[in-house]
Image (spheres, rainbow, N blue to C red):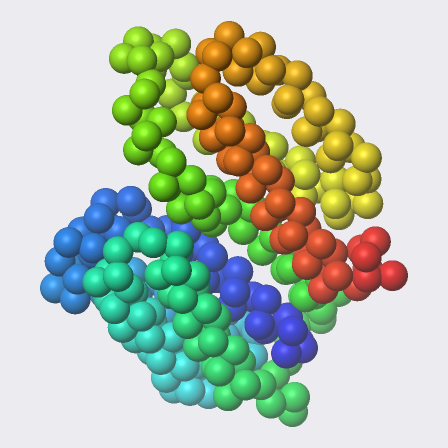
Amino acid sequence: MTTMTLLVLLIAGHVLADFYFQPAHWIVQRNQRHFSAPCLYWHGAIHGLLAALILGLTTEIHPLTVAAYALLLGASHIVIDGLKSYAGTSMKAFVADQLAHLLVIGFIVMLVWQPEQATVSAWLKQSLNYQTFAVITGYLLVLRPVSIIIRQVLAPWSTAMEADKPAEQSETSLQAAGQNIGYLERVLVFTFILLNQFAAIGFLLAAKSVFRFGDLRQSEDKKLTEYVMLGTLTSFALTIAIGLLVSSVATELPLGK
């Protein structure tokens, strides 16, 4: 077990707890009730439990120390998210919130890491390493976290687009289809980067542009065209950035050679 492996594992646990194990109504309740929202404390407990599980399985530090570090991480999450609830849902608040969580995780890794104490079973050493966890974390990031960032980026224009949208338009679209298409699109782009197939990314972008061209031409709406282009380019840019970062961290992948 290395410091990098422990760091990546804790970040993966953070992504799971923050973006996959937190229902949307928890966020709404937290923003309305702030520190009096019970879900805020449940959310902190989930983070603490995941941290305890990771530390307990991958290190040999004393169980009471594991509990103390897990409590620190969970409590910090409650405080940070509680403070964020007063700042609303702006991009600045989101970025500051995530950076604060990452700083806490980094601090805990510095406290925990002692080479003479941290060990892992032989089979885990052979099958899992920080490169593997970096790739897994990358896939987690390009799904819901990137969707939230795109929503934040497009927020200033979303209200205007909803106001201009015809009432019958919602009936001609599959429910949540756009979101699922975005998920699949980002998974493909991320995979292409890991495989060092950058030409395939251009092909995917071109194919999407061809399919969307007819709709945008028929709509004769410049605002819609710009809105779709902004969303698509933001999605691709964020996914490419995450892919390049993961590829450089995981030294066995193309950019790490």
Is residue 169 toward the left or the right of residue 126 in the image? left
Left or right: residue 217 compared with residue 160 = right
- Of the pair 132 and 95, the residue shown nearer to us: 95
Q: Quarter of the image containing the N terminus?
A: bottom right
Quadrant position of residue 95: bottom left
Query: Is residue 45 in view?
Result: no
Q: Residue at x 71, y 69 (%)?
A: 125
* Residue 30 point in image, percent of width and height: 20, 56
- Vertical placement of 168 versus 122: above or below? above
Task: Relative to 229, say whether 137 is above or below.
Answer: below
Q: Position of residue 102 (x, y in %)?
A: 48, 70
Q: Residue at x 71, y 54 (%)?
A: 244
Q: From what the image shows, is residue 179 above or below residue 15?
A: above
The C terminus: image quadrant = bottom right
Q: Out of 96 and 216, give the one closest to the viewer.
A: 216
Q: Is residue 28 left or right of residue 156?
A: left
Foreground residue among 202 and 125: 202
Q: Locate residue 167, reporting x and y percent.
A: 27, 13
- To which quarter of the image does residue 7 belong? bottom right
User: Would you identify the image quadrant in which residue 53 lies?
Assistant: bottom left
What residue is rendered at 37% in x and 41% in y? 155
Left or right, 227 with respect to 81, comes to right
Percent position (x, y) of residue 78? 27, 69
Residue at screen point 65% across, 59% down: 134
Number of marks drawn: 0
